[in-house]
Amino acid sequence: MTALLSHGPPSAEAELAAFMSGRTGDGAVVAFVGLARDSSRAGPVTGLFLDHYAGFTERSLEVIAADAHARFPVSDIRVIHRCGDVAPGEAIVFVAVAAPHRRAAFEAADYLMDRLKTEAAFWKREDGPDGSRWIEPTDQDRADRQRWSD
């Protein structure tokens, strides 16, 4: 299991190839790449800034990945989350999950994204032609996260 913070865009192709290399005991690998959009409810977005606190942010990623690994029958997880400046169209997050069976891989990836979106220790700012605004998880993000509460 790996959870990393990246100061540049992760290469989804390279990360997926490395994650899948030599994997013969699993029947499924699910990968997800989250991209920065060029618009939000507030209007056009020219960039995104993800601020972090060294050590603390990495630990939040590790905890979320470990929780997913403990919750689902998966064999491996890789999370790479971006920090710093992100341009529209660039990757923000890469998640890959390997499991003996597809359902667990899909569910674990979905769970990871719901937790990362609402709980990873980042401070997110959208920049646009009309200025900058700090953003929080939406009500829908919180509802998605709530699905996983026991």
Image (cartoon, rainbow, N blue to C red):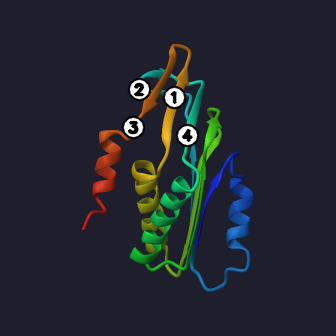
Residue 96: x and y, percent?
58, 64
**Residue at the disc numbered 2:** 41
Callout in the foreground (3, 2): 3
First in residue order: circle 2 vs circle 1: 2
User: Label 3: few (<14), some or many (≥20) within 10 Å?
Assistant: few
Residue corresponding to mark 3: 136
Pointer 4 and pointer 3: residues touching (CB < 8 Å)? no
Residue 94: horizontal and vertical position, in percent? Answer: 60, 55
Write down the residue under mark 1: 126
Q: In the shown orientation, is residue 82 left or right of residue 115? A: right
Where residue 113 sits in the image (x, y, percent)? 46, 55
State whether residue 95 is above or below residue 84.
below
User: In front: 105, or 141?
Assistant: 141
Mark 4, residue position: 51
Asked if the residue at tag 1 contacts the one at tag 2, i.e. Cβ–Cβ closer than 8 Å, the answer is: no
How far is disc 3 from disc 1 in space, using C-alphas?
10 Å
Question: Which mark sits nearer the N-terminus, 4 or 2?
Answer: 2
Question: Which quarter shows the C terminus?
Answer: bottom left
Q: Residue at x 57, y 56 (%)?
A: 55
Q: Secondary structure at mark 4?
A: strand
Say which amino acid is labelled 4.
Asp
Q: How many marks?
A: 4
Question: Label 3 to label 2, Cα distance in Å?
Answer: 12 Å
The Cα atoms of the two marked residues, 4 and 3, are separated by 13 Å
